[in-house]
Structure formats: C-alpha cells, structure tokens
Amino acid sequence: MKPIHNWRAVLRYGWSVRLIIIAGFLTGLEAILPLVPDILPIPIEWLAVSQFLIVMSALFARFIAQSKVSDP
C-alpha cells in the first residue's frame, strides 16, 4: 500500500476523516453507556443507528470533491 500524495490535507480537511472520528466517539459512548445507564436519556439503539449513518456518510464523503483536499 502506498499513501496518497496529499494525505496531510485529507487528514486535516477531509470530511470523511471528521465523520470517522465522530463515529469512533459514538462507538466509545456505546461501550460506556451500559455501565452508567442514567447518563444519557436516549436508548442505546439510537447510538448504533446514528453511528451507522455517520459511517455511511463518511464513505460517501470520501468520494465527493472537496475544495481543500481535491487535486486541481
């Protein structure tokens, strides 16, 4: 495997990276919530659904041209 030439720009400005970070946060939250169930008043199933939607959004965002990341 070989990294893309503008990997720093993708890491800094890419929406797919930002969405994956949010999905990682939700994964951690989903793992912690059963230990302390009274912190968030939302069902854990909603976290799983939102995590799925964010990961799918990240997949699609990777294929959309972004002004600070795309090649000229």
Image (tube, helix red, strand yellow):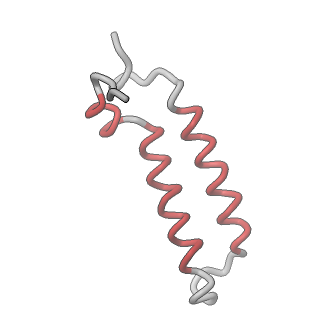
Count of marks, rendered view:
0
Residue drawn where x is 43% and y is 46% of the image: 18
The furthest residue to the top: 72
8 over 44 or under it: above or below: above
Where the N terminus falls, by quadrant?
A: top left
Tell whether 1 sits left or right of 49: left
Pick whichever, 35 or 1, lies toward us: 1
Where the C terminus falls, by quadrant?
A: top left
Q: Quadrant of residue 50?
A: bottom right
Q: Position of residue 26 (x, y in %)?
A: 54, 64
Residue drawn where x is 57% and y is 89% of the image: 36
The furthest residue to the front: 1
49 over 43 or under it: above or below: above
Pick whichever, 32 or 69, lies toward us: 32
39 over 57 or under it: above or below: below
Tell whether 29 sits left or right of 14: right
Q: Quadrant of residue 3?
A: top left
Tell whether 59 sits left or right of 50: left
Residue drawn where x is 62% and y is 89% of the image: 38
Q: Position of residue 63 (x, y in %)?
A: 53, 25
Q: Position of residue 7 (x, y in %)?
A: 30, 31
Residue drawn where x is 50% and y is 31% of the image: 62
